[in-house]
Image (cartoon, rainbow, N blue to C red):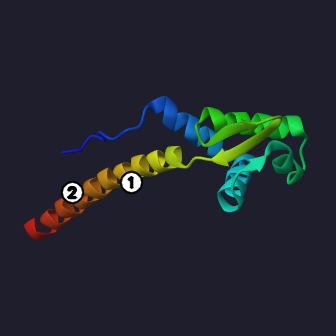
Amino acid sequence: MVERIDSDPAPDSLSLTLKAVGDPTRRAILTHLVQEGPARVTDIAARFDASLNAVSKHIMVLEKAGLVARRTRWREHLIEANLDPLHQAFRWFTDLRSIWDLRLDALETHFAKDKTDD
């Protein structure tokens, strides 16, 4: 019998997270924010060989996925990491792996039974 995944995050949430981290530039931005803490958009853009506009678009994708949050202080926009969506994705992958482990165990039991029957 195959177990169903009950702790599945909202499909749209998971899709947005995976899409956001599927791009190397966005992963690099997120990694930078996790390692260095909140940063101004202009400081983030200065680290990459891309225009401020291009980096801003990457940040918007990360925001839409909930992976970063924007705080505004006067004219300064500070971006900070939020890893909750990654934790949800990790739980989904862990649940999926558990199901596959159960299926593989059942297959192994089936083949072991066939060997003893021969």
Q: Which residue lies furthest to the front in this view?
A: 74
Q: Name the residue under label 2.
A: 106
Q: Quadrant of the C terminus?
A: bottom left
Left/right of residue 92 with respect to residue 57 in the rendered view: left
Q: In which quarter of the image is residue 94?
A: bottom left
Q: Mark 1 points at which residue?
A: 94
SS of the residue under disc 2: helix
* Mark closer to the observer (2, 1): 1
Asked if marks 2 and 1 touch (Cβ < 8 Å), the reply is: no
- Spot occupied by residue 71 in the image (x, y as percentages of width and height): 69, 38
Q: Quadrant of residue 41?
A: top right
Name the residue nearer the viewer: 4 or 62.
Answer: 62
- Spot occupied by residue 67 in the image (x, y as percentages of width and height): 60, 43
Name the residue nearer the viewer: 28 or 76.
Answer: 76
- Spot occupied by residue 29 in the image (x, y as percentages of width and height): 73, 50
The Cα atoms of the two marked residues, 2 and 1, are separated by 18 Å
x 78%, y 34%: residue: 57
- Spot occupied by residue 40 in the image (x, y as percentages of width and height): 80, 46
Name the amino acid type tagged 1.
Answer: Thr
Q: In which quarter of the image is the N terminus?
A: top left
- Earlier along the polypeptide chain: callout 2 or callout 1? 1
